[in-house]
Image (spheres, rainbow, N blue to C red):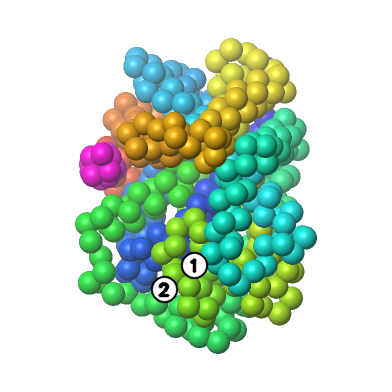
Amino acid sequence: MARGTWGSRIGFILAAAGSAVGLGAIWKFPFVAGQNGGGAFLILYLVFSFSIGLALLLAEMLIGRAAGLSAVSAFRKLAGGAWPWAARLSVLCVFLILSFYSVVGGWTLIYLFEGMRGTVLNTDTAALGVYFHNASSDPVLALGAALGFLGLTGVVVYLGVQRGIEQMSKVLMPLLFLLMAILIVRALTLPGALAGLSWFVTPDWEQITPGAVVEALGLACFSLSVGAGTMVAYGSYVPRETDLPRAAAWVALLAVGSCLLAGLMVLPAVFAFGLDPAAGPGLTFITMPAVFAQLPAGQVFAIAFFFLLLVAALTSSVSMLEPLASYLIDEFGVPRRRAVLLCCAAVALACIPAALSGGVWREVQFLGLNLFELMDYTASNLLLPIGGVVSATCVGWAIWPRARGELSNGAQLPWWLPLFRAVCAVGAPLLIGWVFLYKL
């Protein structure tokens, strides 16, 4: 079966960056920074992103291109033994993430529609909180929106690598950054916004705790979309002539840049209106509509903002569905279109408990977590760290001769190669293992 390839290097970079950006960069980064010291957390995040995070990103892309296959098949071809079984955890991980992520993506559809109607523009944050609760707990609305979002994702992946994923990323990723830039300019011109900017970029090291260090390391590694097999799948479509280290560096730069832009977009506006920067998910779905309600042409900005969230959610969800489909294609020879339909059907079923956990199934809990929270915790705090360690140790130990040849490409070995191996073989497993144990 012929395997697709990216039509251009920029198409691959934008698609991979779109995978890493996601809703996490837009709404999670600002409030996590708010909870962990602002500027000091920002510096820690940058250091970890361009060290451990970049190394893991390159390792996963390298595995994918070296094998020309998705995660499980790639580990079987390159390393054999028990490695494919370890890689199957990444398939389970990305399945769980897409299942509850589609619910959050559905919320963006709801708020985009309500933004067009103007019904969410309200300065009363208590009323906005009630609206968010009612929308997320309504079984028909929450599940219907989640399935609608999953359907959009399926259409893009159904069309394939070049016609679907690459073309979408070439259009939507530049548009995402353009919309963010417009909202940043507007936020920085608000009275009192410079206080938020100063807080965001000025480090206060007294605010840093061991927990904040763990949060910075975890967010750096996992905001780059490593550990779930997505970059292995994307790397499998990279042509041999592509400079993989340079492409990985560009992906990391764009992904980290999107987090910084999100901070500049949200935090100055939040400070300008005296809102709480550590408000969690409510920073997006509860407090931001209150900000728009106090802006000239607020409805226009609200529509742009929630469309931006939808774009960010879609670029990530596409990268999650792709490795699931690739698993069926590579392991069982299922045609792409049938594989996409089967994966969408399975994820749609798994969406049901995630969507209903805020309403009629709210009382169904395990270890104090509802079903949505349990899926999030299992994937983010258990399976993702394991996936990162598997990729790093495989490159650093099991397939290092092949990895070294892949990076040298017949030319002189790059100066940073020993450092890259040290990070993969020792540094990443130790640090990610620390995060794993700390969160447990």
Which residue sits furthest bottom?
191
- Residue 349 location in percent, x, y? 60, 25
Q: Residue at x 35, y 49 (%)?
A: 218
Q: CA distance from mark 1 to mark 2?
A: 7 Å
**Most foreground residue, 243 or 70:** 70
Counting residues from the start of the chain, the first of labels 1 and 2 encountered is 2
Splitting the image into 4 quarters, where does residue 304 fall? bottom right
Task: Give the tally of numbered discs.
Answer: 2
User: Relative to 50, is 418 on the left or the right?
Assistant: left
Label placed on residue 8: none
Q: Is residue 347 magenta?
A: no
Q: Residue at x 73, y 45 (%)?
A: 167
- Residue 78 location in percent, x, y? 42, 22
Read off the magenta span. Answer: 428-440
Can you identify the residue that label 2 sits on? 200
- Residue 294 location in percent, x, y? 64, 77
Q: Kindly tell me whether residue 423 is visible in this rendering.
A: yes
Q: Kindly tell me whether residue 262 is visible in this rendering.
A: no
- Looking at the rendered structure, the secondary structure element under dot 2 is helix
- Residue 198 location in percent, x, y? 42, 80
**Most foreground residue, 277 or 6:** 277
Classed neighbour count for the residue bearing mark 2: other residues with Cα under 10 Å, few (<14), some (14–19), many (≥20): many
**Most foreground residue, 15 or 155:** 155
Q: Residue at x 68, y 50 (%)?
A: 110
What kind of residue is marked 1?
A: Gly
334 over 95 or under it: above or below:
above
172 over 57 or under it: above or below:
below
- Whether residues under marks 1 and 2 lie with C-beta atoms below 8 angstroms apart, the answer is yes
Can you identify the residue that label 1 sits on? 263
What kind of residue is marked 2?
A: Phe
